[in-house]
Amino acid sequence: MRLSKGVLITRINHMLKTILDNKEEYQPGLSIDCVIFGFHDNQLKVLLIKTKYSDKWALPGGFVPVNEDIDEAAVTVLHGRTGLKGIFLRQFSTFGAARRCSVDVSNSVLDFYGIPLDEGKWYASRFVTVGYYALVDFLQTVPQPEGNNEIVEWIDHNAVPELILDHRQILDKALETLRMELNLMPVGYNLLPEKFTIPELQKLYETILGRKLDRRNFLRKITAIGILTKLDEKKSNVAHKAPNLYSFDKEKYEEVVKNGLTQGW
Amino acid sequence: MRLSKGVLITRINHMLKTILDNKEEYQPGLSIDCVIFGFHDNQLKVLLIKTKYSDKWALPGGFVPVNEDIDEAAVTVLHGRTGLKGIFLRQFSTFGAARRCSVDVSNSVLDFYGIPLDEGKWYASRFVTVGYYALVDFLQTVPQPEGNNEIVEWIDHNAVPELILDHRQILDKALETLRMELNLMPVGYNLLPEKFTIPELQKLYETILGRKLDRRNFLRKITAIGILTKLDEKKSNVAHKAPNLYSFDKEKYEEVVKNGLTQGW
DNA sequence: TGTACATTGCGTCAAAATAACACATAAGAT
DNA sequence: ATCTTATGTGTTATTTTGACGCAATGTACA
C-alpha cells in the first residue's frame, strides 16, 4: 500500500521530514555520527539514543546539508542532542564499508513511519558516515530527544548494550583515538566542572586509559604541564582528608592544546 | 549545443566514462584522494597528476563504487596510478568543507570533454573527499597516466606547485599525520628497497620529520626496535666508507606495526 | 575524647630513556 | 701517502619515568 505524501505529512516529525525532504537538502549517502563522552560518578559515559523502531541503541547522528561543512553538521548534531555549543569536537575517522548499512535496518525505519520504499529510496541507499567524538560537561548537558519516538541517555561506557550497524566499532575507534590523543593534548577542560580536584582529574585519565596511574607521579606530571591553577579552597562534604580544588588556566590550556604535548601516560 | 551520448562515446576515455556512467555505479558526492609518498635521492616525493584541462596539479583520486568499501576504492586508485598492490595505505582524514569544490573547476573539466552541464550534473555537485596516504617503493613504481590527457609524476615534496582545490591542505595534513604516526609505528619497509643502509633510513626519517637527527642516537634507537637484520654485505660504489646493508625482518616488522611503538623521535 | 582508618600532599631514590659528544675506522680524492 | 668525509662504536651527563615512604588531614567509632 502506498500512502500519499499528504497523508504522511500528518505524522510528521524530524526524522520523517529528513527522509522525505532529502534530495535537495542533504548530501546523499553521507551521514555524521557523534560519540559524545561525558564524565560523572567516576565513570566515562556515552550519550546514546534508543529509537522505537529498533531494539538496539545508536549513536546520535545526522545528515549533512549540501551547503554546509561536515564539521558544521557535526556541531549541529552535538548541539541538537546536548544543547551545548563551543565544545571540543574532533573528526576521527570515516566508516565506509560497503555493507555497513543493513537494508533491513533502513526498511524497518521506513516501515515504522509508513513510508513507501519508493519515497524512502534515498534513505535506504548505501551510506558512508564520518565519525566525530566530543568531550562535554556531563552536568551542563541536557539530553534532548527529537520527537517522542526516541530516548536519549547517558550510558556508562562499560555497560554499552548492543548497538545498531557498526556503531559499536565506531564507538571503540573513538575511544581508541581519545586514548592516543591523551598523549598529545591535555583533557579535562570540557569534561569536568569548573572547579575540580586532582584525584577527580586522575580518575578521568584512568577511566579513559582503562588502567590505574600512580597518584604521586600523576600530580607531578599534570602540574608540570602548567595548565592548572590551585585554588585557595578545599572540597567540602567529603570523607577523609579534603582535597584541594583546582581550575584550568584557560589561556595556557588552549596554548598547550595548540602546541601539543610531548609526554605520555 | 548539446551533444548526444552517442557522439560523446566516440571520445571515450576513463574520465569521460566515469562522469557519464555515474549514477548507478558510484557513490554520489564522495571521492577518494591519495597522497602517495615515495623516497628517492634523499628526497620525499609525492605522486602528482597534471591534467590538460587545468593548469594546476592534483592528487590522484577517484570515486567510490556503491558496492565497494571506501578502503577498497583507495586501493584501486593506488594500484591504478602506481601498479602496486599490498601497499601501506591509511585513511587519515575526510575533507568536507561546503565550498571545497569549485564549480569553475568542475565546469572546465566538463567543458574540456564537451559534456553538457546537464549530463555532468553529478560531477559538478558538492563533493566530500576521504584522504588516504600511501608509502610506496619509488623504484618499483611505474606511474601510470590514464589516457592521453594527463601526466603522472613524482615531485619533491619541497617543490610541490600550486594544487587544485584544497589538495594542498590535504597533502599537508597527510604529512602531518605521517609525522605523528612515526612515533607509533616503524616506517621504511614500504619506502625503501629491500636492502638499504642505516644512513639512508635516517635520511628518510629526517626528511619526513623535517629536522636533523643525531646519527648515533638514531642507530641505537632504530636497532633497539628489533626490526632490522644486519646483512653481511656493504654498499658498493659509494664515496667514503662503505656503509653496511640492512634489511627489514618482515615478521618482526609487522608485529611492531600491529603492537605499536611507545617511543618518540 | 582519642584511636583506627582512609585519603591527600609532598618528597626521595633508582632505573630507564634521551641528548650530547669523542674517537677510531674505512675508502675515495688529491 | 695524506687529506677529507662519512661510517661504526662507545661514553657520559641530563632528563624523564616508575616505584615507593611518610607525614598531614579529616571521618568513623569505640
Image (spheres, coloured by chain):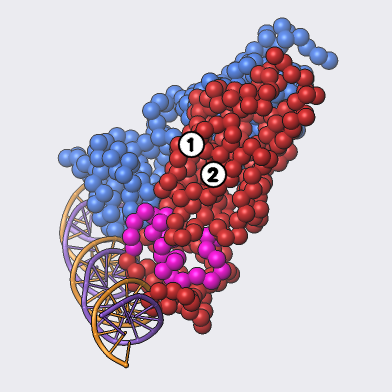
Chain colours: A red, B blue, C orange, D purple
Q: Alpha-carbon neighbours of circle 2 within 10 Å: few (<14), some, or many (≥20)?
A: many
Q: Residue furthest top?
A: B6
Q: Position of residue C16 (x, y in %)?
A: 23, 62
Given residues A114 and C19, the one toward you in this image is A114
Q: Which chain letter matches label 2?
A: A
Q: Is residue A74 among what the camera can see?
A: yes
Rendered position, B7 above or below A207? above
Same chain? Circles 2 and 1: yes
Q: Which residues are magenta?
A: A190-213
Residue picked out by circle 1: A163
B146 on left or right of A224: right
Asked whether the viewer can see residue B100, the reply is: no
- Residue B127's tag is none
- Write down the quadrant of residue B57 in the picture: top right
Against D16, residue D4 (above or below) is above
Percent x, y of residue B260: 33, 46
Q: What amino acid type is highlighted by mark number 1?
A: Leu
**Three-letter residue code for mark 2:** Leu
Task: Give the Cα separation between the discs numbered 2 and 1.
Answer: 9 Å
Report the chain holding disc 1. A
Q: Residue at x 64, y 12 (%)?
A: B12
| Quarter of the image where the N terminus of chain A is located | top right
Could you tell me how many numbered marks the image carries?
2
Which residue is disc 2 drawn over?
Answer: A48
Contact check, label 2 and label 1, Cβ < 8 Å: yes
Q: Residue at x 52, y 38 (%)?
A: A57
